[in-house]
Image: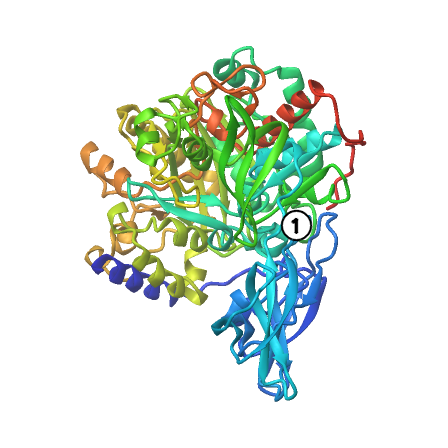
Amino acid sequence: MLQAEKLAFILLIAARIARSAENTSQWPPEKLYWDNQCKPCPAKLYEKDHCANGGVLVGERACKGVFCEGQCTVAVRSGAPAPDFYWDGQCTACPAKFYKDSHCSEGGEIVDEKACGPLGVHCEAKCRKPQSLPAPTPQLYWDGQCTACPAKLYSHCSQGGTLVGEKGCGLLKIMCEGQCAKPAAAPEAADWIIIGGGASGCAAAAALADAGEDVLVLERGQSDLELAETEYADTWPAVVNSAAQLIRWTDQTWGCVANVLGGGTAINGGLYIEEEPDYFQDNFGEAVNLSEFYESSAWVAKQLTVPLRPSSFGRRYADALHEAGEGVADPKPSARMVKDGSWVAYATFNTSKKTWIRRGAAALLHERSDMKNLRFFTSFQVKKINFEGKRASGVLARNNFNDLVTIKARKGVILASGAIFSPQLLQVSGIGESRLLRNLGVQTVVENENVGHNFIDRNILNFGVWASKHRPLYVGYAMSSNTTSQITIESEGWGKVASGFAIPSLGMVPPEQRTEALRALMKPLLTGPIADIMNNMIQVVGLNHKTYSRGSVEAVSADSADAPKVTANYFKDKRDMKQQFVAMKTLMEVIHSEALQGLVNAKTFKGTDATLPVYFSCLGRPQTDATAIITPCLPKDGSSTKDLEEHFRNVVVSSYHYFGSASFGKVVDGEDLLVKGTENLHVIDASIFPNPTRVNPQGTIMAMGHYLGKRLASKSRPSGRAVDGSLSPVW
């Protein structure tokens, strides 16, 4: 724990440094409401008890003397209906949230409670139903059996089902009658079942539904409407800590997989960038119709994105790229990347508005929530894909009431669970390497040793540069791409970017020290003034176009809810290490440009190298000639190549850009991206990309989803009504 103690020490020192901060008008939004929830103070410690109507908790005021009412942002609903509430009739001990299993028998989560029972000393819960389209619910009934309390100690539910609650009965209401629930019926069959409501799944669902196909989307996570941090730029990247699953690779770095409707588009930095045609030709040959693909990409961009807004720093950063030979001084907006040049990126954050609202892929579903031929259910964990011979007949899923249900697919199943969970689900469904399938105890449907192999966690290099003064959140502006150096450069900064990423990545210490215990220590440290000093940084990021090292994804059990074993094999291929030196040189040229001088801060922190962990060791060095302080701190001048290589290994973090684990040509094939050896099982997410995109992948992934949805619909006779897919985006 020595490194963690040193880390805490430097953060505490840094927190004492006085800085001036610019105020920003972007946060909180102007439209706020008081939530009428009078809870203990401070409201921030009871955040889950506030903002039942949606939105982010941003303030509080006194109520009932010593309690606090919360002030919340107005929810961004993207066309979705208002939430539905109900009192659940379950009278339990207080507080109700301690007895979650005995409440909300019609689904959803507890948002409030009130006194109940003869003396008013018990609690009934107010529940908010899931904010997706309603899935089948259990059949509830009161069983008429009046026994001693508590009901769970006695015989109830004579008509079948399980005991889910109780109420007072008898003359004095001191006995208990049981409330019972018969399992919810399985959802009705659909033409297409899409597994995963992320970037590609939502886009494919929109295309299929707009064409009249009957579509069911199953998402393992909550609705994005239930996690209001997904709605704004100002709650990024801290949203990763509430809306994503963290998985520790065997390399001991931490990966991150979204666990919310909208997938990565609900928690990422928002950049939407089209790849160039040569990428698809090199990776998919003639299988992708480029004209149709770019039609889909333009459609998605129109629905969800706008160009990033210029700022004083953004313009100076564009000048820095130009000065470093990485683009023009006045780049223009472009949805498509510019090879060997710079451009202004598009984003799902609308930076032209006063409040930077996010429009992730889930908006494509919410805006279609009134369509009869589209259903999307959250908290549905698909356990396996069912087969009749080689034909995918449907799925086995655990619904939001924890019951197993079988759902039939009339035309096909589309797997859109991402590069971590798509190969795992193939494996537990009987498609994969024979040795692994035997170990899992699953019946082989298709033997394919390539499933889960070729996994790519993109090779990146990130420098945090201390700024001379604090500025408002910056989520990017100009970007550049260079095919000679094989690098794309982007930036973000200020806001809560540095502290937000520090908790999930734990990248301040070497990989072997990145434990859950360190994360528990970091969370309280990275608040208040300590977070402020960390967040006074500009992040300059190099995305290496090619990652040569390949890893794997392997199911550890037949239960898809168990996280798979993931290996990235960082720097196993020596070319990746060589590329880090190229990236370092390129980023240094940008950081040390004349355009950024005066914006970066080379002030030395009091202390010595000996008191600091390696991540911050340069903060105590004399900075006589330095024009910037960069973290993770590089080895001292004159260090050997070996020392620098060791440094790169110590500071490696996951890129969150994952590819290749069900790659085209080896696991899927053909124009419809069919899983080899099956008749109607398709995969449409980043797992099919044999190589990483040269830019942030979300635009390519969403466009591929919409493209495949349109393609499958064009080959299929619609069973539902055709609809107009030209909905106008609602910002």
Along the line of sight, which residue is nearer the eye, 171 or 108? Answer: 171
Query: Badge 1, how many Cα within 10 Å: few under 14, some, many 20+?
Result: some
Secondary-structure class at tag 1: loop
Taking depth in this image into account, of 175 and 615 the one nearest to the observer is: 175
Q: Position of residue 282 (x, y in %)?
A: 48, 14
Q: For this view, does 647 lie left or right of residue 107?
A: left
- Quarter of the figure with the N terminus: bottom left
Work out whether residue 154 can be spotted: yes
Q: Which residue is mark 1?
A: 136
Amino acid type, callout 1: Pro
Residue 389, above or below 155: above
Tell me which residue sits at (28%, 30%) in the image. Answer: 571
Residue 662, given in percent of the width and then of the height, sits at: 44, 26
Seen as rendered, the residue at the extreme front is 158
Q: Which of these two is toward me, 702 or 490? A: 702
Query: Which one is nearer the viewer's eye here, 86 or 6?
Result: 86
Q: What x and y, as percent, mark residue 507?
A: 34, 48
| Residue shown at 72% from the left, 29% from the top | 213
Q: Quadrant of residue 342?
A: top right
Is 499 drawn above or below residue 9 in the view shown?
above
